[in-house]
Amino acid sequence: MNSTNTDNIKNRKVLVVGFGRSGQAAARELIRVGAYVSVQDSGTEDKFDPNLISFMRDNGVEFYLGREPEDMGAFDMLVLSPGVSPELDFVQDALSKGAEITGELEIAYRVGKGNYVAITGTNGKTTTTTLTGEIFKRAGRNTYVVGNIGKAVISVSSESTEDDWLITETSSFQLETTKYFRPVISAILNLTPDHLNRHHTMEAYGQAKAKVFANQTENGYLIINKDDARCYALAQNAKAKVIPFSLKEKLQPGAYLDGDTLMLADGQGGVHEICRRDDLRIIGDHNVQNVLAAAAISFFAGIDMETITEAVKAFRGVEHRIEYCGEVDGVKYYNDSKGTNVDATVTAINAVGRDVILIAGGDAKKQDFAPLVKEFRGRVKKLILLGRDAHMIQEACDNAGYKDYIFCSDMNECVRTAHDIAEPGDSVLLSPACASWDMYDNFEQRGRHFKDCVRGL
């Protein structure tokens, strides 16, 4: 059974830190299980739905909006939203006074009975999680696709039964505050620099990701990328059965690319064909890896090969991830707004191929852009820079001797400029290599704006 039961939550004084989608769902569930709930958020009261605030107050919730509680010793537990750093002074103050620091994913696990598949990694999480969800649904499983992908885990976990499957996209932010969380199947897709403004070092970032399998036993499975040495090294501490996937070598057990065919070896000597590479509707080597991972997860969860193959062949990808937006005057347009780090954008450039006009820039998250610029030669014809930290990409370009860049002030100007520059056969790619928070609420809003601008052509 998942639940460590809710006795350690009932009647406890809990402060929910961050009142976005995750925090709101957590507060509702904590009220339901009998906790004394308070909410802190840096936003002031006028930033929130007044009906939501009054509903919460009617249920005894105390608010600290635009301020921090003065007495952090008053709380038994802090539930941090994913965007909230555990290093904040008032969080550390509560910890020093004996409060348990946890997050919405951990609380969700404690209050529900569902079976978890937890998928993490720097890139590819959303595609792999979405595809895995499609396979499970096609197999007739009671399936919820939740987590970092958009729906708070806790919003469905409390109602979940032992027959339900929660296919969960998990970020390093969500995982770092887990304690008992134990999925049936975990997956780590890759590990490249990201969120170092939060985790500080690659080692700490990797340790946060490795918490996805920390509580698994030999009855569980860990699906992991054999081609990514830094990622695969994490598996040496796993108690779960390790199932690797690879584009480079045949595995037993494991999922791998054999020529142009995606294969799955079951560990018992059996080898099964997933599909041909040209059966896939999503482009790029990274998407072959995502399919291998999703197929391995599904197979070792007991789903038959025929169902897996049908779902894989039908899958069209996810919005904002190298999403084809159409063709104008012989030029293809792709929305990769979810490319919020250097590695994701390198992947997108390689997937689209040559003659790319790249739109990039935003909130740089303290990244090094030299590896990005290195990929431009022979691929990126022109770079259009946008956003607060665009100058950081420009500096990397200057250092590498790449001069084919221009600055634009907004998305509409970027798309218009790209259209004016582009020749038939070129591809215009929005893949910012940066977060969106300097100009947009989230990457989805940025991607939708890009698509609106393309439609405007």
Image (cartoon, rainbow, N blue to C red):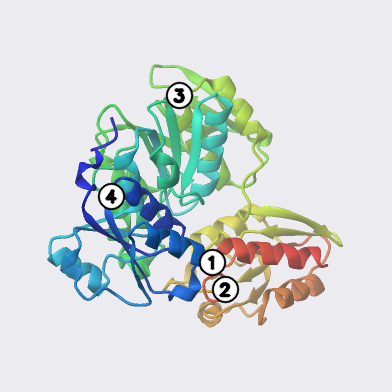
| Residue 200 position in % (x across, y down) | 31, 68
Residue 178's disc number = 4
Q: Earlier in the sequence, mark 2 or mark 4?
A: 4
Q: Which residue is mark 2?
A: 361
Q: Please report whichever mark, 3 or 2, sits nearer to the chain's N-terminal start.
A: 3
Q: Residues within 10 Å of mark 2 (few under 14, many from 20)?
A: many
* Amino acid bearing label 3: Ala
The answer to whether residue 397 is left or right of residue 232 is: right
Residue 149 is tagged as none
Task: State yes or no: discs 2 and 4 in contact (Cβ < 8 Å).
Answer: no
Q: Which residue is more in the foreground, 67 or 251?
A: 67
**Residue 14, image x, y percentages:** 26, 58
Circle nearer the viewer, 3 or 4: 4
The kind of secondary structure element at disc 4 is loop
Residue for badge 3: 265
Mark nearest the camera among 3 and 2 is 2
Q: From the viewer's side, name the closer residue of 40 and 305.
A: 40
Q: Is residue 194 above or below residue 387?
A: above
Please name whichever residue, 424 or 54, is drawn nearer the observer in this view of the structure.
Answer: 54
Element under label 1?
loop
